[in-house]
Image (tube, helix red, strand yellow):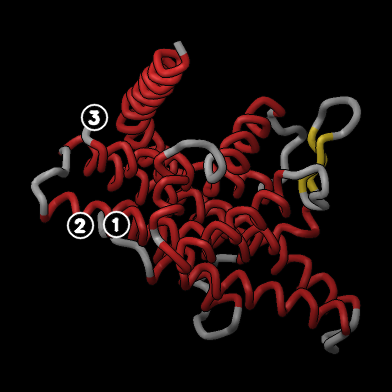
Amino acid sequence: METISRVIVSLVYYNSLVRDTLEYTIPKDSYEVNFYDYKRNGIVNEPKLNTPLKVFLDQNGEKADELRKKLEQFGEDFYSDNSTVIKKAADNTLRVDHAQSVKIFENVIPLHEELNSIINLHVSFARQNNQLEERVEKLVQADERFYRAVALLSLQGELVRQFEEFNKVMRESQGQPTPQSNFIQNDLNTLVKALNTVRANATCKDNVYTTALDAVFAEVEMMNGRRDLPARKTFADVFNDANVKISELVKDSEAGWRENYTPLLQELIADTQKNQQAQQQQAEDKAA
């Protein structure tokens, strides 16, 4: 694997761990502890060990130092023993505080976009220097599409939950704003801002993606009163329609992502192990 390809695949690997943190915004009966440990290991250690990501951070001055601090803070906030959002309990299960889901979105989405822009810079450099492998280019495209799908899925779920809670609170207060309704309104605004970021930075334009995206934004306009509900439809119908379109996008994009990602990640791991063994051998030869 070309050196620049190793860097791109390494960055995509790290960004996939950032993306998969969105899992913890989706309420489930339980979360897989092994997958949490896998993410924690990568998020915390990749910027520290002798990886392509660390080499990139070491070689790119002040901007990279800022990014390193963000990565460290991200690890501290969501993958450390000090996290208040995701905690491993004594019985080896994960406890997730869904009251802090908005905090996950506020951190994951801008960080993912920043890493994405770095990946795209490497892709452009590799293309200009005739070093861009077709399989790496396909991986980056598949990763972009799957990320947008996961972001829409998780944001849609939280948006619907918060909107339903907002309406419940407003009914209880007979339509009068309360501190609680104002708090939920702020969260809803934050979620819409995150959705706008996801849309603004997307490069995929295929019909499955744009149909799902349009459904979510039409729904937002109905929520804030800028668009009428379709004839003979309730909000529940609109939410279900959007969910069907998002599910189709997730299913389609996940299959493409796995197909492109798995073989390249395995090759990256094999290359890394080979390099580590070579370095170890060199150290042993020098010491002999």
User: Which residue does the numbered mark 2 point to in the structure image?
Assistant: 124
Q: Earlier in the sequence, mark 3 or mark 2?
A: 3
Single out the mark in the foreground, 1 or 3.
3
- Tell me where residue 142 appears, x and y as whole percent: 31, 43
- Tell me where residue 233 appears, x and y as whole percent: 55, 65
Up the image or down, 60 lies above or below 255; here it is below
- Tell me where residue 275 appears, x and y as whole percent: 37, 23
* Depth order, front residue of 142/136: 136
User: Which residue does the numbered mark 1 point to in the structure image?
Assistant: 120
Residue depicted at 25% across the width and 43% down the height: 4
Amino acid marked by disc 3: Met
Answer whether labels 1 and 2 touch (C-beta < 8 Å).
Answer: yes
Image-based side of 95 in relation to 278, left or right = right
As drawn, the label of residue 1 is: 3
The quarter of the picture where the N terminus appears is: top left
As drawn, the label of residue 20 is: none
* Depth order, front residue of 182/227: 182
Q: Secondary structure at mark 2?
A: helix
Residue depicted at 68% across the width and 46% down the height: 24
